[in-house]
Amino acid sequence: MIGNGGTEYILENLKLKYVYDYMFHLLNDYAKLLKFKPTVPEGAVEICSESMACPVQGLQKSFMEESMVNSPSDTPPCAMPSPYTPQNLKQFLQEKENLIQQVKKKGVNSLLA
């Protein structure tokens, strides 16, 4: 049951578009820290996605087409939650401990059944 839920979550939420968006924003933020201006090396050749996907067939081609991103997302890849207040942190840790105890108790009971 947990495995199925995890698989479902991955299939619905971990799409390559989100990975590419994350990489795009990460590299853009990193580029702001550079102290030099990057240049295209002499003799460099631009490769477009079509030249990579056209010669392949079957599953490999469908995967390339599915994972192709036409433009980066305008929104940042994620937002950090605000920090916990001491009271919220204490409540969170208590709930976590209660859940751990429930799992341990159910685990022992299922072994005895």
Image (cartoon, grey):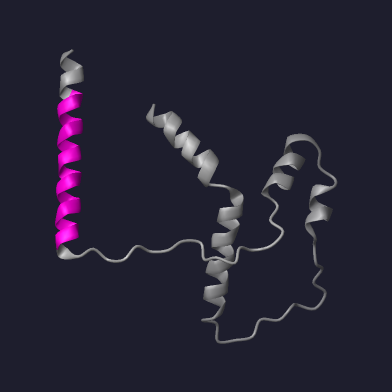
Q: Is 82 situated left or right of 94 in this image?
A: right
State yes or no: residue 77 in magenta.
no
Instruction: Residue 75: name its quadrant.
Output: bottom right
Image coordinates of residue 103 in percent, x first then y, are 20, 32
Image coordinates of residue 44 in percent, x first then y, are 80, 72
Residue drawn where x is 53% and y is 68% of the image: 26
Q: Is 14 situated left or right of 107 in this image?
A: right
Residue range (magenta): 87-107
Query: What is the chief secondary structure element of the magenta stretch?
Result: helix
Residue projecting furthest to the top: 113
Which residue is more in the foreground, 46 or 109?
Answer: 109
Vertical arrangement, residue 18 with respect to residue 82, above or below: above
Residue drawn where x is 57% and y is 47% of the image: 15
State yes or no: residue 105 in magenta.
yes
Image coordinates of residue 106 in percent, x first then y, are 19, 25
Instruction: Residue 105: name its quadrant.
Output: top left
Residue drawn where x is 71% and y is 81% of the image: 39
Q: Is 36 situated left or right of 64 in this image?
A: left
Vertical arrangement, residue 1 with respect to residue 111, above or below: below
Which residue is more in the foreground, 47 or 44?
Answer: 47
Vertical arrangement, residue 76 with respect to residue 18, above or below: below
Which residue is more in the foreground, 1 or 41?
Answer: 1
